[in-house]
C-alpha cells in the first residue's frame, strides 16, 4: 500500500474503490416479497461516507473538461487587496477575478454576461455528462435573466429550460429584482408558522411544561427556521416589523397571555429572556462578516465582499439598500473604530457580536492576530526551496536591472544611459563555468554563455535582443537558445531551477516545486 518514501500509492486506493462497486446487486421489496437481483452499474452507494467525496471528484473532473473546452468566461469582478475598508476607491480596485460557476453538491449555478456563451456552456456540460453516463435534469434547471430579455430559451435534448423571475436555491429565494428581502422574510415566516403550530397542542398549550423548557425548544426549532439565510438579508422597517410581530405572537402563546391582557412587549421579553429579532439578525450578519474577514485572500467570499462588478451602471433613482450598508450600520452600533483588527481574534469578535463593548484588550489581541495572519500568509507564499526571481526590466544598453517601473527610475536611466556596462548588472547572469560572461553583443543569463552575435536570454534583455519565454528568435554561436540583436524588448519574470536552470513562468499547479524536488542535475548553477 505504501511506496519506499512512505507515500500511499493512489492506484491501490483506486483498486479498493473498484472492488466496492464491482458486481453490485440489489433487490426490491414489494408487498413484503423480494424481487430478483438487479445489477447496479451507475451511481454511488447511499449512506456510504465515501459517496460525497467520490461524487465531488467526479463533478470536478467533468467541470474541468467543460472549462477547458469553453475557456475563461463569466462575470468579471474587481476587488482590492486592502481588506480593511468595505468601500474601496476606484483606484484601489487593482485586482480582477472571474466568477463563472458556483457549486454545492449536485446544485450548480452558471453565470455569464453573454447568452450565446452561456448556451454553449450548457450544451457542452450536457454533452460531457452524457458521455460518462449522467444526465442533467432539465425540468429542475431554471434560467434567470438580469437587465435584459431572451426570445428563445436554451433547449437540451428536446426540452426547453424555463425562464423564471424567482426560484429557490439552497433554501433561499433568489429574485431578478433583488431590491430587498421582503419576499424572503415572508417565506421564512410562513415556514416558521408551520413549525410553531405543529407544537401547539403537544407543547405550547401544556401548562405542566415550564416556560424555560418551552423557550429552549423555541430557540432550537422555531428560530433556526425563521432566521435561515438571515446573514445575507437587507432589511427595512417593514420587514423588521413583520419579524417582531411574529415573535411577539409566539412569546405570548408560550407564556399564555393575549393582547387583551395589555402586557408590554418589553415585559414579555424580560419574562422569556428573549431579545428582539432585529438583534438576532444583526448578530448573524456580524458573525458572517467575521468568517469572511478571516478567510484567505484567494477565496471568493472576501473577493466579492471587497469588490464590485467590472462594468455596468446602477439604475436612476434612489439607490437600493445593500448588505454593506447594513454592516456599516451594525459596526456603528458597536462603536468600533478598527473592526478589522478586532475581527481577527475569534473570541474577542464573538464577545462583540453578543453585545459586549470593545475594550483595549480586545483591540490588542486583534492586532496580534492580524500580525500573525500576515506573517503566516507571507510564509505560505515563500516556498521552502530557493526561488530565483528574474529582474523585470533590464537596460538594453548597459544591462542594469530594475525590478519594476515604480518611481520612474528605469525610464530616467534609459533616457540618460550612455551605454557603459555596469558590473553590478551581471549579478543575475549565470554561465556554465560559474562566471559572468559579457561581450558587446549580449549578456548571457541563466545558463547561456555569450559569444559571437547570439546570446541566451531568459527573463531579461541584453544587447537589444528580442526575448521570449524560453529563448530569443533566430540563432547564434554562443547561446543555448540564441537571440538576434536589434529586436524589440520584451521582459519576463519567472522561476528558475537552481540545479539545472529550467524556467517556469509561475508556481501555478505546483510543477516548479515538483521539478526542483526531483531534479538530479549534476551541474548545479550558482544563483
Image: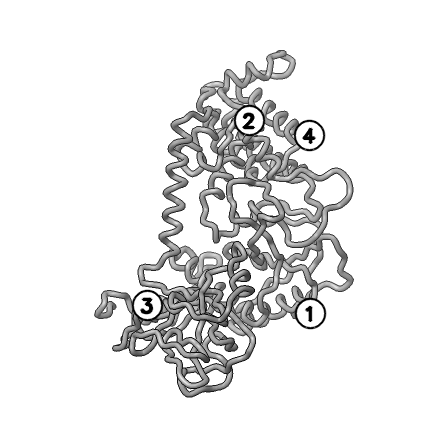
* Of callouts 4 and 1, the N-terminal one: 1
Label annotation for residue 158: 1
Instruction: Read off the residue under disc 4.
Output: 238
> Residue 493 placed where, x, y %?
46, 66
**What whole-number distance in Å separates the C-alpha atoms at marks 3 and 4?**
67 Å
Q: Secondary structure at mark 3?
A: loop
Q: Is residue 237 left or right of residue 88?
A: right
**What whole-number distance in Å separates the C-alpha atoms at marks 1 and 2?**
56 Å
Q: Is 151 drawn above or below residue 444 in the view shown?
A: above
Task: Tell which tag, 4 or 1, sits nearer the viewer.
Answer: 4
Q: Is residue 192 left or right of residue 512?
A: right
**Mark 2 crowdedness (10 Å alpha carbons): few <14, some 14-19, many ≥20:** few
Q: Nearer the viewer, residue 200 or 87?
A: 87
Question: Are the residues tagged 2 and 4 within 8 Å (C-beta)?
Answer: no
Q: Nearer the viewer, residue 364 or 424?
A: 424
* Of callouts 1 and 3, the N-terminal one: 1
**What whole-number distance in Å separates the C-alpha atoms at marks 4 and 1?**
45 Å
Instruction: Read off the residue under disc 2.
Output: 333
* Of callouts 1 and 2, the N-terminal one: 1
Q: Is 306 drawn above or below residue 311 in the view shown?
A: above
Q: Is residue 91 left or right of residue 443?
A: right
Instruction: Read off the residue under disc 3.
Output: 527
**Mark 3 crowdedness (10 Å alpha carbons): few <14, some 14-19, many ≥20:** some
Question: Are the residues tagged 4 and 1 within 8 Å (C-beta)?
Answer: no
> Residue 473 placed where, x, y %?
51, 82
* Of callouts 3 and 4, the N-terminal one: 4
Q: In the rendered image, which quarter contains the C terminus?
A: bottom left
Q: Residue at 63%, 37% (x, y): give it.
A: 234
Q: Secondary structure at mark 2?
A: helix
Q: Give the number of marks.
A: 4
Amino acid at each position: 500500500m505504501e511506496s519506499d518514501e512512505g507515500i500511499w500509492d493512489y492506484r491501490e486506493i483506486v483498486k479498493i474503490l473498484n472492488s466496492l462497486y464491482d458486481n453490485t446487486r440489489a433487490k426490491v421489496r414489494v408487498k413484503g416479497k423480494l424481487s430478483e437481483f438487479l445489477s447496479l452499474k451507475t451511481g454511488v452507494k447511499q449512506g456510504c461516507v465515501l459517496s460525497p467525496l467520490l461524487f465531488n471528484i467526479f463533478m470536478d473532473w467533468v467541470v474541468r473538461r467543460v472549462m477547458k473546452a469553453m475557456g475563461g468566461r463569466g462575470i468579471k469582478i474587481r476587488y482590492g487587496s486592502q481588506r480593511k475598508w468595505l468601500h474601496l476607491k476606484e483606484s484601489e480596485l487593482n485586482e480582477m477575478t472571474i466568477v463563472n460557476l458556483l457549486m454545492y453538491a449536485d446544485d450548480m449555478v452558471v453565470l455569464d454576461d453573454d447568452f450565446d456563451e452561456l448556451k454553449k456552456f450548457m450544451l457542452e456540460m450536457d454533452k460531457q455528462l452524457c458521455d460518462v453516463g449522467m444526465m442533467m435534469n432539465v425540468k429542475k434547471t431554471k434560467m434567470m435573466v438580469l437587465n435584459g430579455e431572451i426570445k428563445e430559451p436554451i433547449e437540451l435534448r428536446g426540452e426547453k429550460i424555463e425562464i423564471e423571475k424567482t426560484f429557490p436555491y439552497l433554501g433561499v429565494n433568489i429574485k431578478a429584482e433583488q431590491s430587498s428581502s421582503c419576499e424572503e422574510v415572508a417565506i421564512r415566516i410562513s415556514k416558521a408558522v408551520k413549525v410553531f403550530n405543529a407544537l401547539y397542542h403537544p407543547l405550547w398549550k401544556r401548562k405542566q411544561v415550564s416556560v424555560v423548557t418551552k423557550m429552549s425548544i423555541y430557540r432550537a426549532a422555531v428560530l433556526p427556521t425563521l432566521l435561515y439565510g438571515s446573514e445575507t438579508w437587507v432589511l427595512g422597517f417593514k420587514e423588521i416589523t413583520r419579524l417582531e410581530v411574529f415573535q411577539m405572537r409566539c412569546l405570548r402563546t408560550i407564556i399564555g397571555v393575549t393582547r387583551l391582557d395589555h402586557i408590554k412587549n418589553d415585559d414579555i421579553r424580560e419574562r422569556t429572556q428573549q431579545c428582539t429579532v432585529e438583534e438576532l439578525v444583526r448578530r448573524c450578519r456580524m458573525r458572517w462578516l467575521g468568517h469572511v474577514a478571516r478567510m484567505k485572500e484567494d477565496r471568493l467570499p472576501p473577493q466579492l465582499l471587497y469588490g464590485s462588478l467590472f462594468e455596468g451602471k446602477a439604475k436612476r433613482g434612489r439607490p437600493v439598500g445593500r448588505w454593506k450598508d447594513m454592516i456599516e450600520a451594525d459596526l456603528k452600533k458597536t462603536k468600533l473604530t478598527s473592526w478589522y483588527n478586532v475581527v481577527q481574534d475569534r473570541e474577542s469578535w464573538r464577545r462583540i457580536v453578543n453585545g459586549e463593548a470593545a475594550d483595549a484588550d480586545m483591540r490588542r489581541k486583534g492586532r496580534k492576530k492580524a500580525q500573525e495572519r500576515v506573517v503566516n500568509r507571507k510564509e505560505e507564499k515563500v516556498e521552502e526551496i530557493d526561488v530565483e526571481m528574474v529582474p523585470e526590466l533590464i537596460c538594453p544598453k548597459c544591462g542594469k536591472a530594475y525590478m519594476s517601473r515604480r518611481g520612474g527610475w528605469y525610464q530616467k536611466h534609459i533616457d540618460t544611459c550612455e551605454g557603459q556596462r555596469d558590473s553590478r548588472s551581471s549579478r543575475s547572469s549565470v554561465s556554465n563555468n560559474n562566471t559572468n560572461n559579457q561581450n558587446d553583443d549580449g549578456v548571457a543569463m541563466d545558463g547561456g554563455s555569450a559569444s559571437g552575435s547570439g546570446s541566451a536570454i531568459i527573463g531579461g534583455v541584453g544587447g537589444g535582443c528580442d526575448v521570449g519565454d524560453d529563448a530569443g528568435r533566430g540563432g547564434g554561436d554562443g547561446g543555448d537558445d540564441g537571440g538576434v540583436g536589434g529586436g524589440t524588448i520584451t521582459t519576463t519574470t519567472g522561476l528558475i531551477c537552481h540545479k539545472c536552470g529550467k524556467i517556469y513562468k509561475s508556481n501555478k499547479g505546483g510543477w516548479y516545486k515538483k521539478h526542483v524536488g526531483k531534479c538530479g542535475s549534476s551541474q548545479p548553477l550558482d544563483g
